[in-house]
């Protein structure tokens, strides 16, 4: 194998994949709450998947300009954990299979079509959009080479996630076990509850350690060495 020229190696090493595109996560509170609600619930009910919110996805190594930041992305089979960006070649070549976009007042139909084509081109299997202002839900599922629209009248279940979407005056989303997604406020309350439980466990652990240290000190004072 011929050695890689130094200039080529330096060029490859110089590729930078920014963690941010400089755009805000949301344009208003309702869009933000929907993004957090979808991301939080999906993360909780999909233990075998990485779920990202407003995370840049780079599908092509060496090309930092080909990128998009879905409001929510789901990569089945990829481990959970912190990422600055979703770099597909680092993730075993696995593209996010499912993406969600929540419309904001600044979104345009053309921009959504552009995202649809991007997702179609780079391997997304399911694409869902929700417009909370106009109460419009749309689903696209891959059929061959393309993402095809699905006629959704009252309900649709994601083939990959098992998550159900009920469409009426509002959008109701249900986990695979049939329980409804927590609301934004409920998610916040649940996070606070878990934080309190973690603090209580930590305090109890510290108290036990302090009691153990005090007992050992008493034994040493009595000339007894603790095991």
Image (tube, rainbow, N blue to C red):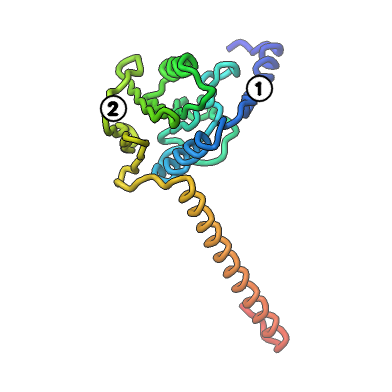
Q: Measured from the top left, where is residue 92 in percent x and y?
A: 47, 28
Distance from Cα at disc 2 to Cα at disc 1: 41 Å
Give the camera-side residue of 44 and 192: 192
Q: Earlier in the sequence, mark 2 or mark 1?
A: 1
Quadrant where the N terminus sits is top right
Query: Of the numbered discs in the image, which one, if any, rests on residue 140?
Result: none
Q: Measured from the top left, where is residue 155 in percent x and y?
A: 27, 33
Residue at image point 28% right, 32% down = 156
Quadrant where the C terminus sits is bottom right
Q: Measured from the top left, where is residue 185 in percent x and y?
A: 49, 49
Query: Of the numbered discs in the image, which one, if any, rests on residue 152?
Result: 2
Res. 79 visible in picture: no
**Image quadrant in which you'd find residue 223:** bottom right
10 Å neighbourhood of mark 1: few (<14), some, or many (≥20)?
Answer: few
Q: Nearer the viewer, mark 2 or mark 1?
A: 2
10 Å neighbourhood of mark 2: few (<14), some, or many (≥20)?
Answer: some
Q: Measured from the top left, where is residue 138 in percent x and y?
A: 36, 25
Q: Is residue 191 left or right of residue 158?
A: right
Q: Is residue 40 left or right of residue 139?
A: right
Give the camera-side residue of 7 and 103: 103
Compared with 179, 33 (above or below) is: above
Res. 179 visible in picture: yes
Residue at image point 32% right, 32% down = 158
Q: In terms of secondary structure, where does tag 1 sit?
A: loop
According to the image, label 1 marks what residue? 16
Residue at image point 60% right, 18% down = 64
Compared with 122, 104 (above or below) is: below
Residue at image point 41% right, 23% down = 124
Q: Residue furthest bottom?
A: 222
């Amino acid at each position: 194998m011929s050695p890689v020229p130094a200039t080529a190696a330096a060029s490859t090493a110089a590729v930078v994949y920014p963690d941010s595109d400089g755009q805000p996560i949301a344009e208003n509170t309702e869009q933000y709450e929907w993004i957090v609600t979808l991301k939080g619930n999906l993360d909780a009910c999909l233990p075998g998947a990485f779920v990202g919110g407003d995370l840049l996805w780079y599908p092509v190594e060496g090309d930092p300009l080909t990128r998009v930041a879905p409001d929510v992305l789901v990569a089945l089979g990829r481990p959970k954990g912190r990422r600055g960006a979703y770099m597909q070649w680092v993730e075993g070549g696995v593209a996010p299979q499912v993406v969600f976009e929540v419309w904001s007042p600044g979104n345009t139909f053309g921009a959504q079509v552009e995202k649809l084509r991007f997702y179609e081109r780079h391997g997304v299997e399911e694409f869902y959009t929700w417009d909370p202002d106009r109460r419009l839900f749309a689903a696209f599922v891959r059929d061959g080479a393309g993402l095809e629209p699905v006629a959704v009248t009252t309900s649709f279940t994601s083939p990959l996630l098992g998550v159900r979407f009920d469409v009426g005056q509002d959008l109701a989303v249900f986990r695979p076990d049939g329980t409804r997604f927590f609301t934004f406020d409920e998610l916040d309350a649940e996070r606070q509850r878990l934080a309190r439980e973690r603090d209580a466990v930590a305090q109890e652990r510290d108290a036990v350690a302090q009691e153990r240290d005090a007992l050992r000190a008493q034994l040493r004072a009595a000339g007894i060495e603790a095991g």
